[in-house]
Image (cartoon, rainbow, N blue to C red):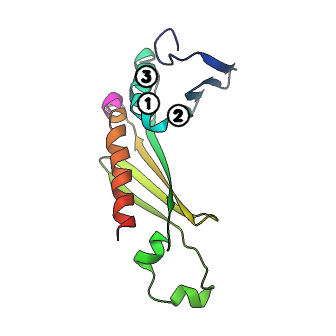
Amino acid sequence: MSQRGILTDSIKSFTHTPALSVVETERFSFFVDPDRLQLGIKKNFIKEVNSLCEKILSYVRYLPETPYKAVGFNFGYELEYETSILQKIYCPGDKLESLFSENFQLGGIIKYEFSGFTVKLIIQPDINEKIKADFNFHYGLNDNSDIENIIKMHGEAMAESRRVLEELVNE
């Protein structure tokens, strides 16, 4: 991978077995098994996020015979809140307070379509007066799918996740 320019940092750890391969650098973790190709950012997310797409594309171009089945993007956010986002939007008055207590927390799962992706948003309350919002963008591939153009939608998917959160928080 370093010879092909996919991972240009020095490799901190490398594991390769018939079942999986894991490569760790200072900034990235790269995981491959028969069902998944995953590239994650370990630090400097803001600085590194734009390089993810090109690194994955380099890998896909290097192995064009690989039968990819899906493309997925995951974005996780942690937000501070006074009242649960979902509680502000969906709960009528004091109904849930009377069912549980005045200190209840609300979470939920929202599923919708975006540019051919099925998006699942999981909103979970946290114990530190924060809320976790995890987006999963899933695109099922078929023989005619243009995997490169779908991977290039990473930036659009990230912008969509931010747009949704901004609208939920500003309700």
The amino acid marked with disc number 2 is: Ile
Q: Quadrant of residue 63?
A: top left
The amino acid beneath tag 1 is Leu
Helix, strand or loop at mark 3: helix
**Residue 130 placement (x, y as % from top left):** 55, 63
**Residue displayed at 46% across by 14% down:** 5
Nearer to me, 146 or 9? 9
Residue that numbered label 3 is attached to:
60
Q: Earlier in the sequence, mark 1 or mark 3?
A: 1
Nearest to the eye among marks 3 and 2: give it.
2
Task: Let me know if residue 89 is in the magenta part.
Answer: no
Residue at screen point 42% across, 60% down:
111
Query: Closer to the camera, 2 or 10?
Result: 10
Q: Earlier in the sequence, mark 2 or mark 1?
A: 2
Where is mark 2, residue-wise? 41
In the image, which residues are magenta?
Answer: 145-149
Q: Does 47 appear above or below 110?
A: above
Q: Nearer the viewer, residue 140 or 38?
A: 38
Amino acid of disc 3: Val
